Image: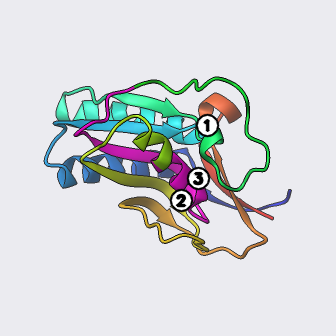
Amino acid sequence: MTVKAQLMDEAAMRRALMRISHEITEKNRGTEDLVLVGILRRGADLAQIISDNIEKIEGVRVPCERIDIHNFRDDLTHIADAADENPRIDVTEKKVVLVDDVLYTGRSVRAAIEAIFSMGRPSAIQLAILVDRGHRELPIRADFVGKNVPTSHTEKIAVMTERYDGCNAVMLTE
């Protein structure tokens, strides 16, 4: 893997996630019935940052959960036999903001939506993405986007978070 460019440094990520946090509270007219659900791995880290930001903005702690979509994927040939370890959060009649790091084909988002519906019937599901790189295979679009980055099919976006990588940054690789 060759790094072609750094697309976002820590400060740029912080600004983008703060802007997304403001947009989420504005679109939802506050935090009532709002739940953040981050897709494991890095989407969950970003959801936690957004939750922290919303608490700073609104003074209210928004519930934030992590979700593992592995058993809901349609593009994997082997499904894990492990018991469902996703939290059983109450999403019924809640406004769920699904958070992920990169939006590419849309398959992860589709799997996450299926996982959320397995927990109940939310009043709405919104999508927050740090980087949208295009090339959708499914008709999915994000409600909140940190950065749009047109890419080729051979390029990849690597979102790095403190928890997994020791820093916060976004890299374009090939």
Name the quarter where the N terminus is drawn.
bottom right
| Three-letter code, disc 3 | Ser
10 or 23, nearer to the observer: 23
Give percent across and percent down for residue 12.
49, 52
**Looking at the image, is mark 2 or mark 1 nearer the viewer?**
1
Cβ–Cβ under 8 Å for marks 3 and 1: no
> Is residue 141 visible to us here?
yes
Q: CA distance from mark 3 to mark 1?
A: 12 Å
Write down the residue under mark 2. 131
Label located before the other in sequence (2 or 3): 3
Boundaries of the magenta span: 89-113
What residue sits right under mark 3 in the picture?
A: 108
Q: Secondary structure at mark 1?
A: loop
Residue underneath mark 1:
41
Classify residue 53 as left or right of residue 135: left
Kindly state the secondary structure of the residue where label 2 is placed.
Answer: strand
Q: Is residue 90 magenta?
A: yes
- Marks 2 and 1: CB-CB under 8 Å? no
Q: Position of residue 31 (x, y in %)?
A: 19, 38
Q: Residue at x 75, y 68 (%)?
A: 155
Residue type indicated by callout 1: Arg
Whether residue 52 sits left or right of residue 151 in the image: it is left
Query: Relative to the observer, which residue lies in front, 60 or 84?
Result: 84
Name the colour scheme. Answer: rainbow
CA neighbours of label 1 inside 10 A, class few (<14), some (14 to 19), many (20+): some
Image vertical order of residue 148 relative to residue 84, above or below:
below
Please report the residue visible at 59 percent of the width from the left and 58 percent of the height from the top.
107
Image position of 150 with respect to 166: above or below: below
Which element carries disc 3, helix, strand or loop? helix
Q: Is residue 58 left or right of residue 88?
A: left
Callout 3 environment at 10 Å: few (<14), some (14 to 19), or many (20+)?
A: many
Q: Earlier in the sequence, mark 3 or mark 1?
A: 1
